[in-house]
Image (spheres, grey):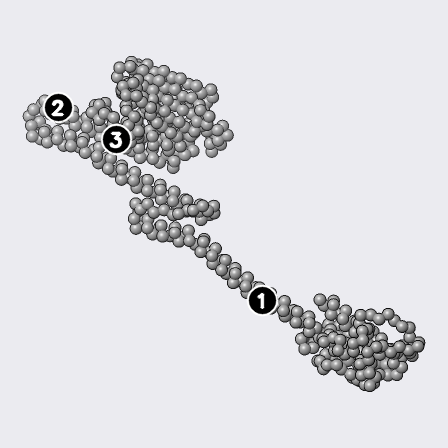
């Protein structure tokens, strides 16, 4: 843009130089007026006819450029003519120079000064100063600046609206999280949860983590309530039995050795049962925390299977125990070895207890893809389909009379289930009434590289 303005000044200077150069004497006011108003160039016989350029049209030069100011000076630097009065200084130059001066109506102008020599005698006959006030340039600059400012304001408003919408969308999950926290604070047992939606960002991850935390807290609260209710329920009977025998002793047992022996024996039996019950409840409580304390444990399953199998053969010589080990390699599973042994003991002990006629127990272990499966089969009393679903509930007994007679509290299978599921495994029962039962356990196999990493740690 500035280059075009400079070229316009240069064209006017060349045009004026050609016009005034045709004079023989020093320029005066009348010569200037006449030269600027003429429609065509004056040519002398001595001057060659030059090809007319775009700037040498028939229009009077003074009216050709609105932003151009023309000044003509005499050789003595006396101002002879000025098209428009502008506040721009004048300094003589011996050749054409176009300068950018910080003067003029817009604060910046182009000024070109050049001496004029006669084409006839080569004498200096005056000076020409062409000033470009850059009105179109400044007008365009103001228009562009205004457009930029307007665009900036619109962009600022638009970005503000978009930012507000984005902020609302970001703050909404946090607001829901805060509201859910207040609800949980007032009612710890509330099932209030955050609606996660389909997002895939940090807030969604936070909401998922919060919901998972609430679910775990809810489970812990329910487990605590269940624990207290179960203990209260199960301890009520032995406490009542002991209380009854103590009253009996207080009334008649002091003088009757038979009553004394009978009451003491029954009381000791109930106390042993209470001790066993408390221990099993503690085991169950610990089984619910395996993910916290034993999540990195690794165990070679073959060693524990064979060890438990040999122990039961030794303790129950009247039973036939059969082991089928189909594992080709030493497979590792993610479970604490004592817990795996405890699970096997619970299942094998139940198999022995409820095998009345055919005293035979089958123990098998095999690999199935990424899991290992353990099966314990007996040929005892069996149970109905309904019982196979409820058998893992706390204190559930298929036959309460027989279970109590055999010393069961109904917690063994609950402990086994809690332990297996704590290590991301599965346990289930298959049974036919009066034909025996099969208890199956499925645990994920640990890859070799994971086992090596665990051993290094």
State which mark lies toward you, 2 or 3: 3
Q: Nearer the viewer, mark 2 or mark 1?
A: 1
- Residue appearing at x 47%, y 33% in the figure: 457
Badge 2 or badge 1: first in the primary sequence: 1
Residue sitting at the far right: 46
Q: Which residue is mark 3?
A: 395
Q: Is residue 425 visible to the viewer in this orientation of the structure?
A: yes
Residues packed near mark 1 inside 10 Å, few (<14), some (14 to 19) or many (20 plus): few
Q: Determine whether label 2 and label 3 are within 8 Å by CB.
A: no
Quadrant of the snapshot with the N terminus = bottom right
Q: Nearer the viewer, residue 29 or 372?
A: 29
Quadrant position of residue 434: top left
Q: Are marks 2 and 1 in contact (CB under 8 Å)?
A: no
- Picture quarter containing residue 293? top left
Could you tell me which residue is drawn at 47 percent across and 20 percent down? 328
Left or right, 163 with reference to 22? left
Q: CA distance from mark 2 to mark 3?
A: 30 Å
Q: Which mark is residue 261?
A: 2
Number of the label disc, if any, that sits on residue 149? 1
Compared with 102, 407 (above or below) is above
Image x and y of residue 353, in percent: 27, 20
| Spatial separation of the CA atoms under disc 2 and disc 1 | 105 Å
Q: Vertically, is 320 above or below 34?
A: above
Query: Which type of secondary structure does the marked residue at label 3 adopt?
Result: loop
């Amino acid at each position: 843009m500035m280059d075009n303005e400079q070229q316009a000044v240069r064209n006017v200077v060349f045009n004026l130089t050609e016009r005034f150069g045709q004079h023989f004497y020093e320029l005066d006011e009348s010569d200037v007026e006449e030269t600027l108003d003429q429609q065509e160039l004056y040519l002398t016989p001595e001057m060659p006819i030059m090809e007319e350029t775009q700037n040498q049209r028939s229009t009077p030069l003074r009216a050709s450029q609105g932003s151009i100011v023309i000044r003509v000076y005499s050789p003595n630097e006396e101002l002879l003519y000025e098209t428009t009065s502008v506040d721009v200084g004048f300094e003589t130059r011996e050749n054409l120079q176009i300068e950018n001066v910080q003067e003029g109506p817009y604060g910046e102008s182009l000024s070109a000064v050049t001496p004029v020599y006669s084409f006839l005698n080569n004498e200096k006959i005056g000076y020409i100063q062409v000033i470009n006030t850059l009105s179109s340039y400044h007008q365009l600059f103001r228009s562009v600046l205004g457009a930029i400012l307007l665009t900036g304001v619109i962009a600022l408003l638009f970005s503000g609206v978009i930012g507000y919408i984005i902020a609302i969308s970001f703050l909404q999950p946090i607001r829901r999280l805060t509201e859910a926290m207040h609800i949980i604070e007032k009612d710890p047992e509330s099932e209030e949860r955050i609606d996660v939606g389909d997002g895939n960002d940090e807030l969604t991850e936070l909401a998922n983590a919060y919901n998972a935390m609430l679910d775990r807290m809810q489970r812990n609260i329910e487990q605590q309530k269940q624990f207290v209710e179960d203990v209260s329920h199960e301890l009520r009977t032995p406490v009542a039995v002991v209380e009854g025998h103590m009253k009996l002793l207080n009334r008649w047992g002091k003088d009757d050795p038979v009553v004394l022996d009978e009451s003491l024996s029954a009381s000791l039996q109930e106390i042993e049962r209470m001790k066993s019950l408390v221990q099993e409840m503690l085991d169950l409580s610990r089984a619910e925390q395996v993910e916290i304390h034993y999540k990195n444990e690794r165990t070679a399953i073959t060693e524990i299977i064979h060890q438990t199998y040999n122990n039961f053969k030794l303790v129950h010589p009247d039973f036939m125990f059969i082991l089928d080990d189909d594992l080709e390699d030493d497979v590792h599973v993610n479970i604490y070895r004592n817990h795996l042994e405890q699970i096997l003991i619970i299942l094998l002990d139940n198999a022995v207890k409820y095998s009345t006629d055919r005293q035979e127990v089958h123990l098998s272990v095999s690999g199935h893809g990424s899991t290992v499966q353990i099966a314990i089969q007996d040929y005892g009393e069996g149970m109905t389909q309904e019982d196979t679903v409820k058998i893992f509930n706390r204190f559930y007994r298929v036959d309460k009379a027989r279970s109590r007679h055999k010393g069961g509290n109904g917690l063994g299978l609950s402990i086994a289930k809690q332990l297996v599921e704590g290590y991301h495994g599965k346990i289930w029962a298959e049974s036919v009434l009066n034909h025996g039962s099969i208890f199956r356990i499925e645990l994920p196999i640990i890859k070799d590289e994971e086992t090596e990493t665990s051993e290094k740690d």
